[in-house]
C-alpha cells in the first residue's frame, strides 16, 4: 500500500524525554518523505489511494514538520548554543541553513500535493516535478537527519542539565496543544 504506516519502535524503557520526541519526529520525516517519493512514481494508481497519500504527506509537511522545526530552532538550538562546544555550534549553524533549504522545497511541494489531492489524475502531469522535488528533499533530509542524530542530539543527554531537558520536553509538548 502506498501510505502504509508502520508502528513506532520504542527507543527506551524509561519515560519519554525530549530526545525520544525528536527521534520519533525523524522516523516520521523518513516515513512521509518515502511516501512522497513513492507517490511521485505512482501514476495510474487507484485515485482514492493517491488522494489519501497526498493528504497525509501534505498534512505532515504543513502541520507536523513546522512543529518539529520549531522544537529544534526554538527549544533545542538556544540551549545547545549556550554550551562551549564548537563542533555543536557548527552543526547548529548547518542545521539552521538546512531548515531554510528544506522549507523552500516544502513550499514548492505543498501546492503540488494539494492539486493531486483534489484531482488525483493531476499526478501524471505533475509527477516529474514531484519526483524532482522529493528526490532533492530526500537527499537533503538524509544529510540533515544524520547531522542532527550524530552531532546535535547526543549533546541533549550528554551535556544539557536535566532541568533544561525537562523544560525542553514541556515546551515541545505545549507547542502541540490545541490553541497554541
Image: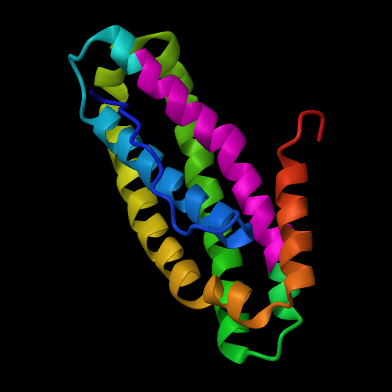
Residue at 74%, 60% (x, y): give it: 168
Side of 163 where 76 appears, left or right: left
- Which residue, as the protein is rendered here, is positioned at the far left? 44
Range drawn in magenta: 51-76
Could you say where residue 25 lies in the image, as x and y percent from the top left?
Answer: 51, 48
The relative height of residue 113 versus residue 165 in the rendered view (above or below) is above
Whether residue 78 is visible to the viewer of this picture, yes or no, is no
x, y percent for residue 81? 72, 78
Q: In the rendered image, which quarter is residue 179 located in?
A: top right
Residue 73 covered by magenta stretch = yes
- Residue 26 percent coordinates (x, y): 46, 52
The answer to whether 143 appears left or right of 179 in the picture is left
* Quadrant location, the N terminus: top left
Residue at horizontal 68 percent and vertical 65 percent from the top: 76
Q: In which quarter of the image is the C terminus?
A: top right
Front residue of 163/87: it is 163
Q: How many labels does the image show?
A: 0
Query: What secondary structure predominates along the stretch shown in magenta?
Result: helix
Residue reaching furthest to the front = 13
Image-quadrant location for residue 6: top left
Question: In percent of the image, x 68 and y 52: which residue is there?
Answer: 70
What x and y, as percent, mark residue 46?
23, 10
Amino acid at each position: 500500500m502506498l501510505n502504509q504506516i508502520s508502528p513506532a519502535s520504542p527507543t527506551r524503557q524509561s519515560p519519554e524525554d525530549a530526545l525520544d520526541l525528536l527521534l520519533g519526529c525523524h522516523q516520521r520525516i523518513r516515513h512521509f518523505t518515502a511516501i512522497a517519493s513513492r507517490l511521485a512514481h505512482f501514476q495510474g494508481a487507484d485515485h482514492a489511494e493517491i488522494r489519501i497519500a497526498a493528504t497525509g504527506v501534505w498534512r505532515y509537511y504543513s502541520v507536523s514538520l513546522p512543529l518539529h522545526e520549531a522544537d529544534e530552532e526554538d527549544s533545542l538550538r538556544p540551549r545547545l548554543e549556550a554550551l562551549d562546544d564548537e563542533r555543536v555550534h557548527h552543526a547548529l549553524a548547518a542545521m539552521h541553513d538546512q531548515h531554510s533549504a528544506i522549507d523552500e522545497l516544502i513550499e514548492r511541494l505543498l501546492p503540488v500535493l494539494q492539486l493531486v489531492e483534489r484531482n488525483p489524475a493531476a499526478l501524471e502531469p505533475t509527477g516529474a516535478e514531484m519526483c524532482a522535488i522529493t528526490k532533492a528533499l530526500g537527499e537533503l533530509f538524509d544529510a540533515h537527519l544524520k547531522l542532527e542524530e550524530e552531532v546535535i542530539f547526543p549533546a541533549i543527554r550528554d551535556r544539557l542539565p536535566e532541568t533544561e531537558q525537562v523544560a525542553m520536553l514541556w515546551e515541545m509538548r505545549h507547542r502541540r496543544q490545541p490553541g497554541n
